[in-house]
Amino acid sequence: MRLVLLLTAAVTVSAGGCALIMPEKKQDPFPTIEVKATRPPPGPDRVVLTASNIAIMDKVQFETGSATVKPVSFPLLDEVAKVMKDNPQIEEVEIDGHTDSTGAADFNRKLSQQRAESVMKYITGKGIKQARLTAKGFGPDKPVADNESDAGREANRRVEFNILKQGPKKTLVKDQ
Amino acid sequence: MMTKLIVLALAVCAACTPPGMTPAMRTEIQTKVTGAQQPIQECYQRQLTTNRKLRGMMVVTFSAAAATGAFQEITLRRDEPQDPILKFCVISELAKLKLDKPPGSRVVVDSYPIKFEWANP
């Protein structure tokens, strides 16, 4: 009886030991789940090159009270970067950050500066040389609409891409 | 001496038991993940409206908890779409799943591929 138990234990131990040194069997792959969705039709150009700026037809969105660009705006900024790549004659672009007049002006100037810098960082990350970009935060100092209304404040919270310097035109999509 | 040997044998066995997945569990995991396809598809559809270039392969790893069967430890081994919202959506949907019966031991899924593709050119 003792011998049987001993043998059983020994076999178990050695089997366990074997399992330790034997490579684990690779798991058979699961079948690929295919997720399909319909692409929306291409909309009108959201980014248009004009004589004086790179106009964006959408907003660059940031996290509230922060300079972090929301991921939803990445494709828009990708398009801005593409316009700069496709148009090497654009030598210098100033990224301007603007806010509405809500809150302390100094805080808004600082926040808009940080937001402009965040946008610049994202675009340089897409392969645009930093020498072609500058960032400037104006806070509430250059409103384009009345700060008394929601719509006006919304319009004033914006990022602009103004062309400061460009060489001979190679491609000009549209003029203002 | 013999008792010690038996205890040792049991301990070694327990330590070496690979994360077990029976064919039935495998089928159930497949069914559960396929069941999450619809909400994942809706999420993909939504994200395509913000980025119409979005597509690519995601490979997910996860485990089913021994005691509950709940899907957990969900991570991406591969993420071609690189869309944080889509990634969050996939992880959230998988985290809602669980096996019908607790498996008793942790079940690991090494690799579950999900391909995101446009339905139209």
Image (cartoon, helix red, strand yellow):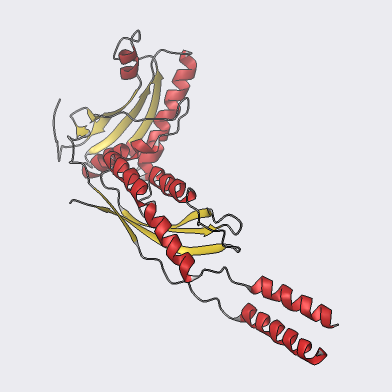
Pinpoint residue A93: horizontal percent, then vertical percent. 30, 32
Q: Residue at x 49, y 49 (%)?
A: B95
Q: Can you give x and y, in whole percent of width and height, for residue A24 in the image?
A: 55, 76
Query: In the image, residue B22 lies at what x, y percent?
Result: 50, 70
**Residue depicted at x 71% and y 82%:** A13
Expressed as whole percent of the image width and height from the top left, the position of residue B29 reads 45, 61
Could you tell me which quadrant the N terminus of chain A lies in? bottom right
Indicate the quadrant where residue B116 lies.
bottom left
Q: Is residue B6 left or right of residue B79?
A: right
Viewer can see residue B79: no
Say above or below: B57 vs A146. Answer: below
Say if A96 sits above or below A104 in the image: below
- Between B84 and A85, the one lying in front of the other is B84
Give the left or right position of residue A139, taking residue B117 as reference: right
Can residue A105 be seen from the camera position used here? yes
Q: Residue furthest top?
A: A148
Residue furthest toward the right?
B1
In-front residue for pair A71/A107: A71
Task: Tell whether B63 sits left or right of A88.
Answer: right
